[in-house]
Image (cartoon, rainbow, N blue to C red):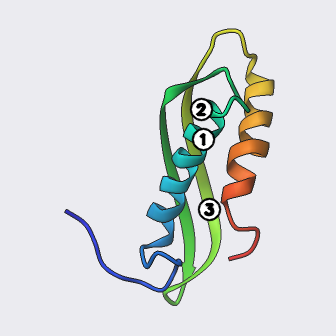
Amino acid sequence: MFGYATNETDVLMPAPITYAHRLVQRQAEVRKNGTLPWLRPDAKSQVTFQYDDGKVVGIDAVVLSTQHAESIDQKSLQEAVMEEIIKPVLPTEC
C-alpha cells in the first residue's frame, strides 16, 4: 500500500504517479476512440521528476511502453505516441 497527500497535483497525489497514470489513461483513450488504431491494450508508464528543495522543477525521464500492431514502423510509432499521448498529458512547465 502506498499513499499520502501532497499539493504537487490537483488530485493531491505525487506528480510521478499522477502523470504515469494519466499517460496510460490517454493511451487507452486514443486506442479506443480510433485516433491510434494500431495500439493494443497493454501499456506501462514511468515518469521521473526532478526535485529541488522538495519542489518539482522538471521532468528527468518519461517511459511509455505500449503494445502495437506489427504493421507500424518504429519512427511513426514514436512520433504518434509523442504527439497524441505524451505532449497532451505532461506539463510544459513544472
User: Residue at left 60%, top 55%?
Assistant: 61
- Residue tagged by mark 2? 32
Q: Nearer the viewer, mark 1 or mark 3?
A: 1
Q: Which residue is outermost to the bottom?
A: 53
* x then y, percent, for residue 60: 62, 62
Does dot 1 land on a helix, a strand or a loop? helix
Residue 55 versus residue 27: which sits nearer the camera?
27
Q: Is residue 28 left or right of residue 72?
A: left
Furthest residue toward front: 33
Q: Secondary structure at mark 2?
A: helix
Rendering coords of residue 21 (x, y %): 48, 54
Q: Residues within 10 Å of mark 1 (few under 14, many from 20)?
A: some
- Identified by mark 3, the residue type is Asp
Q: Residue at x 25, y 66 (%)?
A: 2
Q: Relative to residue 43, is residue 85 drawn left or right?
A: right
Compared to 73, does 76 lie above or below? below
Q: Check whether the beta carbons of the residues at disc 2 and disc 1 lie within 8 A of each other.
A: yes
Distance, label 2 to label 1, CA atoms, is 5 Å
Placement of 83 over or under 61, stated as above or below: above
For label 2, count other residues whose C-alpha is less than 10 Å away and answer few (under 14), some (14-19) or many (20+).
some
Task: Quadrant for residue 90, please give it.
Answer: bottom right
What is the three-letter code of the residue carrying label 1?
Answer: Glu
Q: CA distance from mark 1 to mark 3?
A: 25 Å
Element assignment for label 3: strand
Answer with left or right where residue 42 lies relative to residue 89. Answer: left
Query: In the rendered image, which residue does mark 3 sit on?
Result: 60
Residue at left offset 69%, top offset 29%: 34
What separation in Å lies between label 3 and label 2 (alpha carbons)?
29 Å
Looking at the image, is 29 positioned above or below residue 46? above
Q: Quadrant of the N terminus?
A: bottom left
The residue depicted at 63 percent of the width and 65 percent of the height is 59
| Residue identifier under label 1 | 29
